[in-house]
Amino acid sequence: MRYTATYFFGISCLVLSLLSSVEGWAQCGSVGDPIVNITFGTRLNPDFGGGTTTYHRNEQGELNDGEYKLGSNGNQGRESWHNLRDHTHPNEEGMMLLVNASYDTGEFYRIRVSGLCQDTRFRFSAWIANVNNIAECDSNALSPNVRFVIEDLNGNAVSLPYVTGNIPPSATPQWQPYGFEFDTGNQTEFYLVLINENPGGCGNDLAIDDIQFRPCGPEITLDAALTRGTDTIFFCEESASPIAITSAMEASEAYATAPAFQWQTRYEGQTEWQDIPGETGASLTIRPVHYQWYRVTAAASKANLDNRLCRVVSDSLVVIRDTVHLAPMEDLVISPGQQISLHPQTNGTQFHWHPAVGLSNATVRNPVAYPTETTTYQLMVSNTQGCYNVALVTVRVLPELILPNTFTPNGDGINDTWVIAGLDEYPSASVQVFNRWGALVFSSEGYQAPWDGQSNGAQLPTGTYYYIISSKLLTRPLTGSVTMLK
């Protein structure tokens, strides 16, 4: 991808379309799976890769000019060489080809490459490191210089040679990639030849790893509409808006007539790509339900598309289904003048409470609520991708308690009991009434039945009595006196 920006789109349906460009002819913008992949194996299973060499193999001692070995570290060639780990497996389980170049220039490695596709462009690549440090040979070490040649089976060069140029020593070991592209024409088998361009002597020592041949085609980039160059798209499960994702292919002479396509996908945790059945056209409609990757494979013809050795692939586009979780909130109860904190359970990062009346801050996760009347608050919580969720919470404000200071339990049906309006809405309210000597004459949990002036079934004398009313919803107990008259 040309860019690495990440954008959000709310989608339930993604539409992928393939577009062609007419601006010039691409050389090698996209590559396919490796047809040849020579890693030289591992310490338990070293593999020369089927190649041949004019050099002498020395697996026992330090390498002299014109010798090679397979090693898992650069300093296994000579003790003074770099502590260089294998490029394929840096954990030192992998092997590399270590070479002390001959005094004479000339060929030192040849391998026959089979199974390439006709009329297809391929990319050859290899990783090379100068294993000499800067101080080697009194800081005058010769530099490796390798020529790569592709020959047909008769020994004729089929492409211009590629020369690395002098690879200078370095203070720390450094793998460097080298490679070029060539066309197969009507042939499917070739020789890859590596030639030492510099004479041997002190220096000219190198390590080689990961020799690859990959099919090569025009660049294919996956882009979202209005956001060119994205490689990650977030979409929210609550959104129903579709969005178009296009796949732009640079024009190519080989692909100009009737290119063939196959869309592929893989899920999180998978390493293998799977063909999407029937999706071989220029567009794809998907309804992703998981964390998924998508890419398109392409070839100059249907026949080449069916052969993984002849097709190229686009970069992948990851589609992430994003969700803001917001647990239902339990309603809350406060008494007049009381305040309470709101605590939503969510993975969101941005908050908006409505209405803002009666809140300490309407844009924080845990505002303090102090409404003067029962209020239902709506919380909209979102994340950095713009996904959101909504929940409601009601803060019920209990009524102000009305405490009469007299009552007349004389049986006339008027004001016969000490009625405390609103107390029935205070759960687990405790009412205690004492006489003037401090004796408890009445108590009630919840105040289901108002006090009628009796104690243990006997009518109490008129006079002043003293009460304590407690509740967890009261900021403090209510105290005072009530006078009982006849």
Image (tube, rainbow, N blue to C red):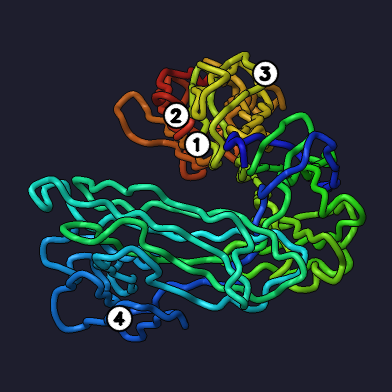
Q: Left or right? Give the position of 243 relative to 312.
A: right
- Pointers 2 and 4 in contact (CB under 8 A)? no
Mark 4 neighbour class, 10 Å CA radius: few under 14, some 14 to 19, many 20 or more? some
- Pointers 1 and 2 in contact (CB under 8 A)? yes
Report the residue marked by disc 2. Answer: 469
Q: Left or right? Give the position of 471 relative to 9.
A: left
Q: Amino acid at mark 1?
A: Ala
Q: Amino acid at mark 3?
A: Pro
* Callout 2: SS: strand
Disc 2 and disc 3: Cα gap in Å? 33 Å
Looking at the image, which residue is at 63% across and 70% down? 272
Report the residue marked by disc 1. Answer: 429
Report the residue marked by disc 4. Answer: 43
- Residue 286 on image: x %, y %: 82, 54
Q: Left or right? Give the position of 133 relative to 268.
A: left
Disc 1 and disc 3: Cα gap in Å? 31 Å
* Callout 1: SS: loop
